[in-house]
Amino acid sequence: MFDNLTDRLSQTMQKLRGKGRLTEESIRDALREVRIALLEADVALPVVQSFTGQVRERALGQEVAQSLTPGQTLIKIVHDELVRVMGQENQSLDLKAAPPVIVLVAGLQGSGKTTTTAKLARMLINEQKKKVMTVSCDVYRPAAIEQLRTLSEQVGASFVPSEASDKPVDIARNAVASARRQFMDVLLVDTAGRLHVDADMMDEIRALHKAIDPHETLFVVDSMTGQDAANTAKAFSDALELTGVVLTKTDGDARGGAALSVRHITGKPIKFIGSGEKTDALTPFHPERIASRILGMGDVLSLVEEVQRSVDQGKAEKLARKIRKGRGFSLEDFREQLEQMQNMGGIGNLVDKLPGMANMPDQIKSQVDDRQTRHMIAIVNSMTPQERHFPDVIRGSRKKRIAAGSGTTIQEVNKMLKQYGQMQKMMKKFGKGGMSKMMRKLGKLQGQMPSGGFPR
């Protein structure tokens, strides 16, 4: 997400960084580049006009002229305006109501409503320890009810069964009664979608909304539709009392226009962004963090949260104890680390959140490929237990067998073994106190860094 926009804006901002003086002409040229970048990202024209107008007004005022670091100050202004356009701060689900808190999930067909319902259930169960029930009121799409039933079982949510012959309003009312009887904390109501906004759809969703009076009404929209996503959200917002938006399929959207348009056009906050089909692929939308990522400054906070959420702390501690005792780092340990990285969305997702990655040369970016990680895991899986613990025995004929078993080449097996050897050396250093030395160095470095990030 935002790949194209990040590349364009990072290049523009890089030209300004460190400049001791900014002229009106250089500011105008920079804003022209920013405008083109936003339009290419499919950001709605009114949003682009408002954004560039606000930046120009602040940039040509005293704020930049009186700054000791005008280039950095202008970058901060662009950052602040990005945050303003996207909504200032994250607005989570409001669960401050008498249980069961009813959350209605609406949207067009194919936008990812059912998957999002399951993702929300998983998040509420795992992170907030809520008792969650789900129900499907989609009596039109084949297997929609069964899909939600299966996903609900996977995430540990209770499910209210329904039939395609039932009326959506009756299904919803029955689910509310069932949630009350079973003392549920949250009831998630998945609704039917259409291929486009039409009168029948709006009448049905209004009737459903009136029947159950949800505390939260979320509009799920496919981010890959760009500014059309914002226009569709506006149509729903005019018909319903929306409380928030969920952007889905952000992993397939390199532009990011929807994220920058939705809040401005609808006035409703983006509460979550979803990527992929897995039920853990839903994260809160933090405008300030997203703005930093757009400008190539990374998103370390989200990266830390991702690690805390995805990494098996027990396994990590077990490996740390093993290394401290000098018992070595085996290929099985190496595979486990690769699998942990895959659980966090892969190396591409991690790199996206690291500061300065936007300025990385294209030839290096192209090498950041999760297929290599999957190949390495397959190579280790093709080895015998003896080979995983004693890799020195892996010679010509064994390499040939391992390559054939993993669907790779002997060259890839050699490359993986070399990378494992480098990581093994690093782990040995950690075992000899290298980790504590590294942490002390990081502590000193952090103490030397200026606080507050941007100049004020």
Image: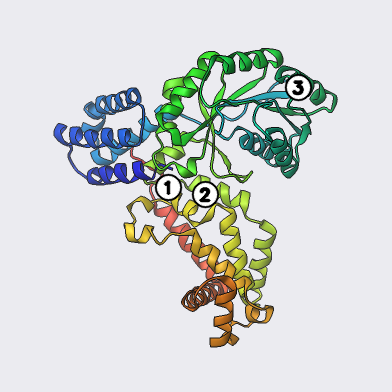
Tell me what residue is drawn at x 36 percent, y 36 percent: 79
**How many numbered circles does the render carry?**
3
Secondary structure type for disc 1: loop
Q: CA distance from mark 3 to mark 1?
A: 49 Å
Whole-Å distance between the Cαs marked 1 and 2? Answer: 9 Å
Amino acid on which disc 3 is placed: Asp
Amino acid type for the residue under numbered disc 1: Gly
Please provide percent x and percent y for residue 127: 68, 40
Along the viewing direction, whichever of 195 and 174 lies nearer the viewer: 195
Which residue is at 32% across, 34% downward?
Answer: 38
**Front-most of residues 197 and 73:** 197
Residue position for label 1: 298
Which of disc 2 and disc 1 is earlier in sequence?
1
Question: Residue drawn at (51%, 14%), measured in percent from left and top?
Answer: 238
Give residue 303's mark: 2
Q: Nearer the viewer, mark 3 or mark 2?
A: 3
* SS of the residue under disc 3: loop
Q: Which circle marks residue 41 in the picture?
A: none
Q: Are marks 1 and 2 in contact (CB under 8 Å)?
A: yes
Q: Is residue 452 visible?
A: no
Contact, CB < 8 Å: mark 3 with mark 2? Answer: no
Q: Secondary structure at mark 2?
A: helix
Residue 119 placement: quadrant: top right
Q: Nearer the viewer, residue 110 or 451?
A: 110
Marks 3 and 1 in Cβ contact (< 8 Å): no
* Residue 166: image tag: 3
User: Of 425 and 430, which appears nearest the observer?
Assistant: 425
Viewed as shown, does residue 188 lie left or right of 363? right
Is the N terminus in the top left, top right, bottom left or bottom right quadrant? top left
